[in-house]
Amino acid sequence: MGADIQEMKIAYIMNCLDKSEITPHTTRHNFESSNYPIDYSIFTDNGSREKHIKEFVEGFATHPIFNDENVGNPQALNNAMRMAFEELECDAVLIMGNDLVMREGWLDAAVRAYQGIKSTGIIGWSWRGTGTSHQMRGFNLNIVSEAERIFGSWFIPRTTWEKCGYFSEFSKYGCWDSTYNVQVNAAGLLRYYLVDYPSIHNATNDSGWYRNMKDEELRKGAEGNLNRIEEIKKTKKHYVSIDGILR
């Protein structure tokens, strides 16, 4: 960690549901390549059927959480984010995927960008191409427009959480990330990808019950997402409480 970076307390948040063939390797790689200290790891096992993924969560996470069944992706993330910001008093959280492989120095770069660009809302590491690059305070950024979204793994600082709060729980899987982008944009904060630090999607075959679950929950979440976006536009509010109320 360079002398010009102010120390931040950071939690790595991840949900797990099976996929023991990629999760441990990907996660260990991301920790080893961060080039910045990660103080806490809050991993939620959302009812995995695979023994090895439960063993990994138990052995690796500083704060392992086990659910007997899938309580939902945004639901588990909200629980972990509340723990990170309210109980552990973190300065930032990382909302991480178990199938996204990060480039060397990914977290160090995010901390530097956040501390250099005070209007930062969400930082991402794109796996879909870098897009248009803008120079800002020495960083190459793909600053997304109001209509665009940051997807994948995220860096969310406390300053964003204080203004925007938690994820909307429309279903067990979908659309919470799209809605949160709208909340952050409505709060007047920047959302951008670090162009020089793309991630790689370690794609797996999401077939069978897992793919069917995701597709069904995405359909359920779509209507709630559209309604919440309209609510944000009409009320000019952008903070969602832990109980899902827009305030």
Image: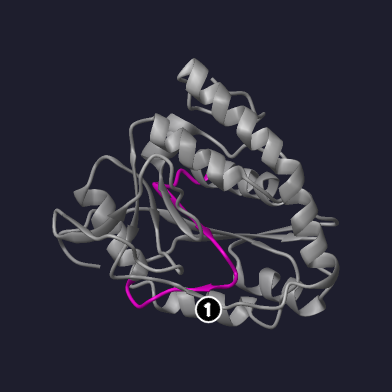
Describe the colour scheme in one phrase: one colour
Picture layout, residue 176 above or below residue 204: above
Residue where numbered disc 1 is placed? 28
Q: Return the residue nearer the eye: 222 or 156.
A: 222
Total count of labels: 1
Q: Quadrant of the N terminus?
A: bottom left
x then y, percent, for residue 75: 69, 44
Q: Which residue extends farthest top?
A: 235
Q: Quadrant of the C terminus?
A: top right
Q: Is residue 182 left or right of residue 91?
A: right
x then y, percent, for residue 152: 51, 60
Query: Does any portion of residue 184 appear in the rendered image?
Result: yes
Picture layout, residue 209 above or below residue 155: below
Residue range highlighted in magenta? 88-105
Task: For mark 1, give the secondary structure.
Answer: helix
Q: Does the magenta segment cover residue 90?
A: yes
Tell me where residue 78 sits by quadrant.
top right
The type of residue carrying mark 1 is Arg
Q: Is residue 11 left or right of residue 3?
A: right
The residue under the point 70% across, 51% down is 173
Q: Does the magenta segment cover residue 126?
A: no
* Magenta span dominant secondary structure: loop
Q: Is residue 144 left or right of residue 168?
A: left
The residue under the point 85% across, 57% down is 68
Tell me where residue 145 sits by quadrant.
top left
Residue count near mark 1 (Cα–Cα under 10 Å), binned few <14, some 14–19, many ≥20: few
Q: Return the residue nearer the eye: 219 or 203.
A: 219
x then y, percent, for residue 51: 81, 77
x then y, percent, for residue 9: 39, 53
The residue under the point 42% across, 37% down is 184
Query: Does any portion of residue 172 appear in the rendered image?
Result: no
